[in-house]
Image (cartoon, rainbow, N blue to C red):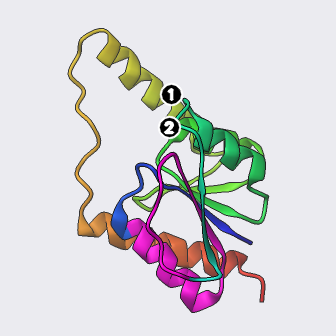
Amino acid sequence: MRIWIDADACPGPVKDIVLRASRRLGVPVTLVANRPLQLPRSPLITAVQVSAGFDEADHLLVQRAESSDLVITADIPLAARLVARGIAALNPRGELYSEANIQERLALRDLKEELRAAGAVTGGPAPYHPRDQQAFANALDRWLARNRVK
């Protein structure tokens, strides 16, 4: 089991929560980004820097993540690719993507993209609040409790 973080746009509090869980439970974590990251020294925590090309981090995550792993990402198309491979994906607001919800999330994302392309103002994501942070921490704890190898 490994936790992967799509780190380029991941909120800082989410990274902190995952790194604390890593230390507490001994679960390895790999952060993937297209820029250098400052990480605490730990044999459990690694970083992979990919080139700045389009979706480079996504490609690496899809290639390297395994069915026993968890990937933290807000990228819905990436989450869809992971779910299709049987890999768990959790967003920074605490929603676990699944076969039951990923197609709806993709359709909504695509609709918003079309509206923005047509000039409609749809706004961006809501600000990241402490309640989102708590929802993420709770979802991560639940996933770890269900999937952690004893």
Which corner quadrant of the image does residue 122 belong to?
top left
Give left or right: position of 32 versus 2: left
Which corner quadrant of the image does residue 16 belong to?
bottom left
Q: Going 43% across and 76% down the picture, which residue do you hit?
A: 17
* Vertical comparison of 82 with 46: above or below: above
Q: Position of residue 23 (x, y in %)?
A: 56, 87
- Is the Cβ of the residue at disc 2 closer than 8 Å to that at disc 1? yes
Q: Pick whichever, 141 or 23, lies toward us.
A: 23
Do we see residue 56 in this rendering? Answer: yes
Residues at marks 2 and 1, CA–CA distance in whole angstroms: 6 Å
Do we see residue 83 in this rendering? Answer: no
Which region is colored magenta? 14-41
Residue located beneath label 1 in the image: 107
Label 1, residues with CA under 10 Å away: few <14, some 14-19, many ≥20 = few
Q: Position of residue 14 (x, y in %)?
A: 41, 67
Q: Going 50% across and 42% down the picture, which residue do you hit?
A: 75
- Position of the C terminus, as image quadrant, is bottom right
Q: Residue furthest top?
A: 118
Q: Going 23% across and 16% down the picture, which residue do you hit?
A: 120
Q: Position of residue 144 (x, y in %)?
A: 62, 77
* Vertical comparison of 5 with 13: above or below: above
Look at the numbered disc 2 and give the secondary structure of its residue: helix
Residue located beneath label 2 in the image: 105
Q: Position of residue 83 (x, y in %)?
A: 69, 47
